[in-house]
Image: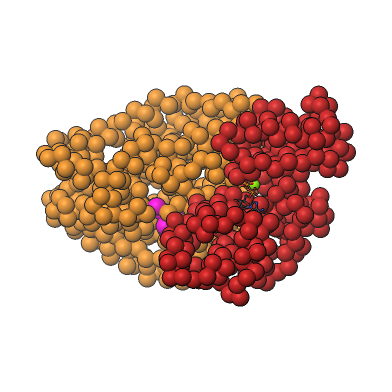
Chain colours: A red, B orange
Amino acid sequence: MLTAGLDIGSVSTNAVLLANGKLIASVILPSGYNHQETAERAWQMILQQGQASAAQLKTIVATGYGRYNVPFASKQISEISCIAKGARHWFPDVRTVIDVGGQDSKVIKLDSEGYVADFVMNDKCAAGTGRFIEVMAQALQLEVSALEQEDLLAASGAQISSICTVFAESEVISLIGQGVARPKIVKGLHQAVASRVGSLAKRLKLEEPLLVTGGVAKNQGVVVALAAELGLKLLVPEEPQLVGALGAALIAAQE
Amino acid sequence: MAFKKIDFKTKGFLKKTMEDYNTQAMNAHAQGIPVAWVTAVFPVELLYAMDIFPYYPENFGAASGTHRRTEELSLIAERRGYSNQYCSYAKAGLGLMYGNAEQAGKEDFGGEMPQPDLLLPSNIQCTPLGKWFEITAKYYNKPLFLMDSPQIEASSWESQKAYFLQQIHELVAFLETSTGRKLDLDRLCEVLNLSTQACDLWNQVLLFAKNKPARITYWDACILMGPIVCWRGRPEAVHYYTELVKELEERAASDLVAVEGEKIRLYWDHIPIWPKMRYFAEFFGNRQTSIVCSLYTHSWAYKFDAAHPLETLAESYMREFVNYRFDQRVEKKIKLMREYEVDGFIFNLNDSCKPNSLALIEKKNVISERLGIPGMLLEADMCDPRFFAEGPIQNRMESFLEMIGSKK
Ligand SMILES: Nc1ncnc2c1ncn2[C@@H]1O[C@H](COP(=O)(O)OP(=O)(O)OP(=O)(O)O)[C@@H](O)[C@H]1O
Ligand code: SF4
Ligand SMILES: [Mg+2]
């Protein structure tokens, strides 16, 4: 049986195709401003990759902020439920998931049966999420994918105390002005994000195994800083950005 | 199954009851009746007994939210230096006051609120409201009397009561000298009895949410509560709630429910988000979810002992859930949640209303642990659209309902 899951996030659109629960195709695209078009494109791409036709699929679950912009989806499920499902598939014992995406960070607790027991999301401010990191990377003239290498070059991080994206940016600018080395600033940023996500996570009683997902989990700099902040061991799946879409496809398989 | 709100047959009666209140407020001066501004939790029975008209500016605050005027009014206050995190009821009221002053000659709030002759705040529910009254009193150069009721400890109830009773005596003297009217204790007893009757009826109304499925929801109650706030102590409240209880009994007899196919029942704290009432009612209704209780709507449950009129006022008004300490406030919420058999709860972390947002994260954790039910926090102002982001809020609420649904 073929099922598909699409996660239309605020930054990335991810789609997966499963054949009897096995991943046979996946794609990650920038969401852009036209979610409907991006969803359609991601859909065509996984069908092609998996050599399947739309007619073979009965259930397609959409998740993420843009989940209501997928006209061909048969069901919409929130990202919290999908991430929990996907995480559990790849790590059957997982008890906590921290997903750091583009505009939200989410911390999800699972009970022993894999049901969502509790969750928290970041408050209004986007500091401590992927967008924040993107803005900072831009100010530092770096690609987000280059941040983790830059982080490794510094022994300690610069102090960035502002918890607001706008103020943190001016803090970074003034650090640049003071001639602070770029790796030190990058490490400082990662620590600032970790501290913010960490204090959100501490609202729940954290239990291991603990998984980090979402695009930001691709940045080892943040993951290492977060592990230090929480004093816990963190696991990262091979493709952390796909967990939500995977969960959506698994829920589709259950329907 | 799309949610369809069933209108109350007594809707017109409610509308008229509330219109009468506003008309009387606006006509009071012309009839030689002094107007006293009061906070929601205040011994207004004294005022009705002395033919002083109690006006609740908080209602204006809420109405400014419903009519989507809070932002415009707040900006007037903010231009004068008030913080955008100050209570948005207060900011709306101050914005109206300053806005009228800015348009020379319109000192009477443009006919939207009656000007106060007296200002009677109490700090039982909060301090921001009292500050708003203080500023207004200075602006119009009118006398103000603050009823002070610090945080309550069960162990100090007796001394607290003595302290509050002392203030009631002072308040009576203050009212008598500033209005030249005498308090007649027999008249006060009549008012107290009417107030008790209205409270009793109001609580009968709320009980209809105990049914499974509920016959009314919190969203209904927020609208239906108008008369218990404004008219308690007067026959108007008793008349209206008598009719409403009758209608609800009919609803029960014909098995009419608020949310068809109710699957999930929730508790909500605290004030509703006024400009978005319909949005929330439909959001939950469409997801077979009823909000069945809240300390906010359950605040009016006075049982006065007319044999000791001043003592009973002191005892009743010196405490409100907001001036209880942390653990007692938690107990009050838990009690309601148990009685109404809820599956979870939603707390609104509302920067405008600090006394009710205090320690919400901790409250959520404690209650979840005690009752074994999940809770979620929402972040929105009760009136100001600048502090309401529908996308993230809806996302959280959907996740929350899915979580409860999957476990059921
Ligand atoms: N290769 C990479 N290296 C480092 N960071 C990355 C990489 N790719 C993406 N990111 C980070 O991940 C973020 C996007 O994460 P993700 O795709 O999980 O977000 P989303 O699901 O669209 O957002 P949300 O769930 O909040 O709506 C980007 O803002 C960026 O900071
Ligand atoms: S909303 Fe809160 S702060 Fe404002 S008047 Fe009411 S109780 Fe006071
Ligand atoms: Mg995401």
Q: Nearer the viewer, residue B98 or A137?
A: A137
Query: Bounds of the magenta span?
Result: B352-356
Locate residue B387 relative to residue A225 in the image: left or right: left
- Residue B355 magenta-highlighted: yes
Image x and y of residue B148, in percent: 31, 63
Locate residue B55 relative to residue A248 in the image: left or right: left
Residue drawn at point x = 50 percent, y = 64 percent: B326
Asked if B53 appears above or below B1 in the picture, the reply is below
Quadrant of res A58 = top right
Asked if B397 appears above or below B176 in the picture, the reply is above
Q: Nearer the viewer, residue B40 or B93?
A: B93
Locate residue B157 relative to residue A84 in the image: left or right: left
Residue drawn at point x = 46 percent, y = 68 percent: A175
Q: Does residue A106 appear in this view?
A: no
Image quadrant holding the N terminus of chain B, namely top right
Image quadrant holding the C terminus of chain B, namely top right
Q: Does residue B149 appear in this view?
A: yes
Main secondary structure found in the magenta portion:
helix
Asked if B49 appears above or below A112 in the picture, the reply is above
Residue drawn at point x = 66 percent, y = 27 percent: A71
Asked if A176 appears above or below B119 in the picture, the reply is below
Q: Nearer the viewer, residue A90 or B255?
A: A90
Image x and y of residue A147, in percent: 61, 60
Quadrant of res B33 = top left
- Residue A245 magenta-highlighted: no
Residue drawn at point x = 59 percent, y = 49 percent: A102
Image x and y of residue B63, in percent: 35, 38
Image x and y of residue A141, in percent: 53, 57
Q: Count up the numbered dots.
A: 0
